[in-house]
Amino acid sequence: AQSVTQLDSQVPVFEEAPVELRCNYSSSVSVYLFWYVQYPNQGLQLLLKYLSGSTLVESINGFEAEFNKSQTSFHLRKPSVHISDTAEYFCAVSDRDYKLSFGAGTTVTVRA
Amino acid sequence: GAVVSQHPSRVICKSGTSVKIECRSLDFQATTMFWYRQFPKQSLMLMATSNEGSKATYEQGVEKDKFLINHASLTLSTLTVTSAHPEDSSFYICSARVDRYQPQHFGDGTRLSIL
């Protein structure tokens, strides 16, 4: 079984400042790792994923996450946030069957 | 590609009625669909896994007679909340995937409010 811990429930940040959302996981088997974003009253959108290969993965809108096997972490970062990045962010882990376990979520609020 | 449509987006109904929520994969065939429930300010809780043509597998604590799931085709799964009560009010989200080697794609969710 897998589990995910998102260490920060709320992250307020000013526009154009950097942000880091922390995610740690536990699993007894090899895993896939995901970050999803949820805007108010909407479903989840896949932000980025780590399946294998390079441990640094990037999204098209400036987010990146690094898989660290020794620390069992998959932290999400963005060097400069926009107001439109205000949302709920979920870290998720799955085994090779792609059945997802989600973290509790981190609310990012970007202020001008 | 990989669009999942969920309908309705919002429903308000009286206690005791049954509500059906549809989840459709618009541009791919989904052998598996998942149903999640999300309480305010909380994460998604998996309710059940639905494979096309077979009975759904429910997670522990989820009443299968309360939450009826049908996955009759490769593009449609339905969740029926039977005899709904106020405690069933929640945000319900579905997801779909092509096969076990592909990631899940999520619908936009259904806000269910039972008065």
Image (tube, rainbow, N blue to C red):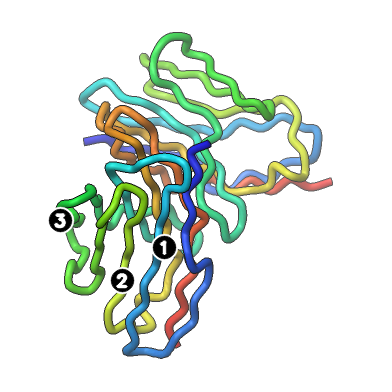
| Residue found at x 60% / y 25% | A59
From the top left corner, tell me how far across and down residue B8 is, in percent.
49, 68
Badge 3: how crowded within 10 Å, few (<14), some, or many (20+)? some
> Sequence-wise, which precedes: disc 2 or disc 3?
3
Q: Which residue is mark 1?
A: B92
Q: Position of residue A60 (x, y in %)?
A: 65, 26
- Residue A43: give its label: none
Mark-to-mark CA distance, 1 and 2: 11 Å
What residue is disc 2 on? B80
Residue, x 17% and y 57% (percent of image)? B60
Give the side of residue A53 with respect to residue B66, left or right. Answer: right
Mark 1 residue element: strand
Q: Please, what is the three-letter code of the amino acid marked with disc 3?
A: Lys
- Going 45% across and 39% down the picture, which residue do you hit? A6
Question: Which mark is in front, 3 or 1?
Answer: 3
Q: Label 3 belongs to which residue?
A: B55
User: Which is more foreground, mark 1 or mark 2?
Assistant: 2
Of the 4 image quadrants, the one containing the C terminus of chain B is bottom left
User: Along the polypeptide, which appears first: circle 1 or circle 2?
Assistant: 2
Q: Is A78 drawn above or below residue B56 in the view shown?
A: above
Label total for image = 3
Residue B34 percent location from the top left of the image: 32, 50
B15 and A11: which is toward the camera: B15
Please determine whether, in this image, residue A1 is positioned above or below residue B41.
above
Residue located 25% across and 57% down the image = B72
Residue at far top of view: A54
For this rendering, which residue is in front, B46 or B35?
B35
Amino acid type, residue under disc 2 in the picture? Thr
Pointer 2 local density, CA inside 10 Å: few below 14, some 14–19, many at least 20: some
Q: Could you tell me if the residues under marks 1 and 2 are in contact, i.e. CB atoms within 8 Å? A: no
